Amino acid sequence: MKKTAAIFHGFGGSENSFWIPWLKSALETEGFDVWTPSLPACSGFDDLGVWIREVAATAPHRDYDVMVGHSAGGTLILQLLSRNDFSAGHAITVASFVKPLPDGQTDNPGFPAGFNVEVVRKNCRALTYIHSDNDPWACGQEQGEFMRRSLGGTLIVMTGQGHFGSDYMKQSYKTFPLLLAHCLLKV
């Protein structure tokens, strides 16, 4: 049976954003069945439930060997793993967040609202958080450290990588070899 992977983009993104097409192709070369949905537009973090409903309705699998999420896509993964109908061998979040972002929204789906730490731990064998020391949207090292302390797992902090892809910051970020290496780890 083929290994399965799901890759989720962040807000304002798609299945063609930044390193997602490259990672999908690289994982397919390694024999994975990879799902990279383009999720519907959301007007903000309080609309993340739209993505949860979309994924729950359209996901080709409920148990993934690897789940990868960029920015809000990582938050989506943690919320999916809080359900009793999704699981992953390895979940990898890139420039993601669980603590409310400093954007003034009172209903931001930050920790612990929106997901359950114990259920996430039960539904995922390994967690990895990849962050930069200079993320412009408060999704940097502090968020990664908070997730590692709260959920367990491995934190990787890279120097000067911003948000690992951003049109606003003119970061094309078309390949991501370190991320691929972590996707291929046996957990």
Image (cartoon, rainbow, N blue to C red):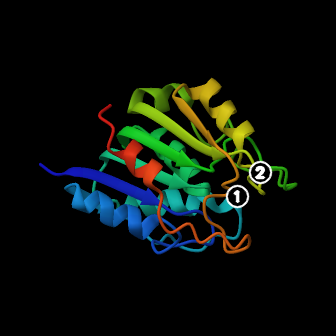
- The percent coordinates of residue 182 (x first, y second) are 41, 42
68 and 174: which one is in front? 174
* Residue at image location 39% in from the left, 51% down from the top: 180
- Which numbered circle lies on residue 107? 2
110 and 167: which one is in front? 167
| Res 143 quadrant in image | top right
Q: Helix or strand or loop: what does disc 1 sit on?
A: helix
Amino acid carrying label 1: it is Asp
- Which numbered circle lies on residue 144? none
**Image: 182 above or below 59:** above
- Which numbered circle lies on residue 46? 1
Residue at the right extreme, as displayed:
104
Q: In this view of the protein, can residue 119 be seen by the observer?
A: yes
Q: In this view of the protein, can residue 60 be seen by the observer?
A: no
Q: Earlier in the sequence, mark 1 or mark 2?
A: 1
* Residue at image location 53% in from the left, 62% down from the top: 51
In three-dimensional space, the C-alpha distance between marks 1 and 2, rounded to whole angstroms, equals 6 Å
- The percent coordinates of residue 176 (x first, y second) are 48, 57
**Image: 181 above or below 156:** below
Neighbourhood count class around disc 2 (C-alpha, 10 Å): few under 14, some 14–19, many 20 upward: few
| Res 10 quadrant in image | bottom right
Neighbourhood count class around disc 1 (C-alpha, 10 Å): few under 14, some 14–19, many 20 upward: some
For the C terminus, the quadrant is top left
* Residue at image location 48% in from the left, 44% down from the top: 92
169 and 56: which one is in front? 169
**Image: 140 above or below 171:** above
**Disc 1, disc 2: CB below 8 Å?**
yes
Q: Is residue 164 left or right of residue 38?
A: right
**Image: 154 above or below 73:** above
- The percent coordinates of residue 52 (x first, y second) are 50, 56
